[in-house]
Amino acid sequence: MISSVVVLALPIQEREGLEFWTFARPHQLMYEPVSDRWTQEGQDLPDVNIFLLDGMALERRTINGFWAGTPLADLIEIEGGTFYKYVTGPIEDVGFVDLTDRLHDEGIYDIINPPSFSPWTSRGRIFGIPHDVHPVLLAYRADIVEDELGIDVSDIETWDDFARIMGKAIKDLDGDGKPDRYPINFWFNDGDALEVLMLQAGGGTFDSEDNIIISSEANAKVLATAVHWCFGEGRIAIDAPDFDAGGNQLKIEGKVVCAIMPDWLAGIWKSDLPQLSGKVKLMPLPAWEPGGRRTSVRGGTMLGFPKAAVEKGTFDDAWEYGKYLYLSEEVARKLFEASTIISPVTKYWDRPFYHQPDPFFMGQPSGSLFIEQAPHVPLRPSHPFRVIARSEIGQVANELRDYADRNNDYTVEGLLPEARRLLAEAQQRLIKQMQRNVFLRPAEEAEVTP
């Protein structure tokens, strides 16, 4: 908290040219040579000054600029978890330039994976160029699954198949009579993991029309399954958090057999868990129903253009630079090579750099596998109440676990009715909160009062 405040208070040195804020050091390093070349290739093009800001500082500076008129950059990278904060009021008051018509008129919309626009869309208007796709696959320890257990993963189509077949992986490794190794890294109240599975199942918080879908049957099934996976005789899950030394050690020790893996997490594993190189493979996520979706999505970044750039006459240059950067094949290649992240620009998906054998994944072409699922990623909601909706779902997950404990019933069938009831109550609570925002009030629920 203190460091964020200090960064926020520090002035950004003014330089001639365009100003670009990002929250990610790897992005800054990747963009700087591209920016230099852009300036050199054209006549009378301004320099681009890329500033790295702490995520919280960037968010605060941006909000202050929109609402208080403090200085803003000409281009700003926004992380998906914060976008909702910029679209809470009337659509015409959003501080970023509405790019919808421009994207269509210039043909940019047609060369980008369509689902990648959804996190940056509010009430049908698009406010950013997407940086990524972030399809999700299932990573598994091939040395355990294939070599030790002799499992053929092609036999796994659904999550029910997964639980039945991968149940063989449960094992007491230290001889104390209790299992140490479990099939999947997952925990019932992990909000990010729950959202990944809910989106895959067709649920989530809001649909593409901004309708509330907390109480959907898909969400009820996912929550009941989540509790079932984590407790009772049917337990198959272990809690081994990412970005955590203890969680990483569980992975290294082979106590985690499978993990839900967006493309960016594959890059993190290569950096943080080199001990697993040559032991891991990728496969599509098991579906919730036969023939169902075999992927999901998690995370995202966009490039936005504050309206202040229009007012000070820098928008046209910023827009041209933004296209040069985000639609660049060089950036797509560097992004994948550095972090295993797939560009949303579909015309590059057949490029050789995506289809090379990946030593970390035992020679599998990891890029090919992620790209195969990229067109099928579910839409990501950008509704301003999404975070509150996720909190409501998290509360339901905890209440459902308590219900399972009280009744000593951890079966999906036994938990589904209670999951439905709790989610219906949560949806009504959210509707009442939304009624207080006249710009985002759900019209179909207008009779509900605060």
Image (cartoon, helix red, strand yellow):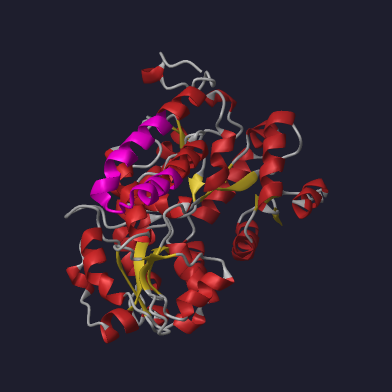
In the picture, measured across the screen, residue 64 lies left or right of residue 167, that is right
Q: Horizontally, is 414 left or right of 426 in the view?
A: left
What residue lies at 71% left-to-right and 48% top-to-bottom?
57
Q: Position of residue 422 (x, y in %)?
A: 38, 36
* Vertical order, 177 against 403 (above or below): below
Q: Is 155 in front, or is 183?
A: 183
Residue 427 visible: yes
Numbered disc total = 0
Query: Is residue 198 placed above or below 257 in the rendered structure?
Result: above
Magenta stretch?
A: 398-427
126 left or right of 418 in image:
right
Please identify the quarter of the rendering in which residue 187 is found. Answer: bottom left
Q: Looking at the picture, how far across and down is residue 323, in whole percent? A: 52, 50
Q: Main secondary structure of the magenta part?
A: helix
Give yes or no for residue 26 being in the magenta stretch.
Answer: no
The stretch drawn in magenta includes residue 422: yes
Task: Point out residue 22 in the picture as x, y percentages from the top left corner.
Answer: 64, 53
